[in-house]
Amino acid sequence: METLVWILHLLFAVAVIALVLLQHGKGADMGAAFGSGSAGSLFGATGSANFLSRSTAVLATLFFLSSLGLAYFGLQQHKPGSVLERTTVPAQTQPAAPSQVPSQNTGSKAGDIPQ
């Protein structure tokens, strides 16, 4: 079921993007007033704007509802506790031991070496 909601969510997102890009901006109204050919379209001069804006609103609502559905599925998989408690810390590796033991005669006095 969650996979179906994911697929629908992505389809709604692409459809909303496409419909928003198809709509005319506010500055396009002046060009339409001088006969840009929108009056002879299938929906008329203002019919296409209403149809596109309504279909965008419907798809945006469906996108919102699918987002809520995905949030519901995400809460069903929620484990109690902090996010930091659920993370795993990688095991720390110890540095390799030196292959040779340093000589005791380094030229320093015994009082210079911190204990």
Image (cartoon, rainbow, N blue to C red):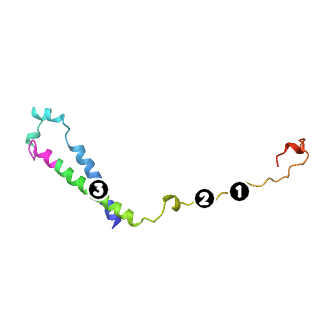
**In the image, residue 26 above or below residue 62:** above
For the point 77% across and 55% down, the residue is 97
User: Label 2 neighbourhood size at 10 Å, few (<14), some (14-19), many (20+)?
Assistant: few
Q: Position of residue 29 (x, y in %)?
A: 14, 35
For the point 56% across and 60% down, the residue is 88
Q: Quadrant of the N terminus?
A: bottom left
Question: Which disc is residue 60 wearing?
Answer: none
Nearer the observer, disc 3 or disc 2?
2
Q: Of 112 and 55, which appears nearest the observer?
A: 112
Q: Are marks 3 and 2 in contact (CB under 8 Å)?
A: no
Spatial separation of the CA atoms under disc 2 and disc 1: 13 Å
For the point 14% across and 44% down, the residue is 49
Q: Position of residue 2 (x, y in %)?
A: 35, 65
Q: Amino acid at mark 3?
A: Leu
Query: Is 8 within the magenta?
Result: no
The range drawn in magenta is: 42-52
**Which residue does the numbered mark 3 point to in the structure image?**
11
Q: Of 40 and 109, which appears nearest the observer?
A: 109
- Determine whether the residue tagged by mark 2 lies in a helix, strand or loop: loop
**In the image, residue 108 above or below residue 78:** above
- Determine whether the residue tagged by mark 1 lies in a helix, strand or loop: loop
**Which residue does the numbered mark 2 point to in the structure image?**
90
User: Label 1 neighbourhood size at 10 Å, few (<14), some (14-19), many (20+)?
Assistant: few
Spatial separation of the CA atoms under disc 1 and disc 3: 51 Å
For the point 11% across and 40% down, the residue is 38
In the displayed structure image, the side of residue 72 where residue 86 appears, left or right: right
Question: Which disc is residue 94 wearing?
Answer: 1
Q: Amino acid at mark 2?
A: Pro
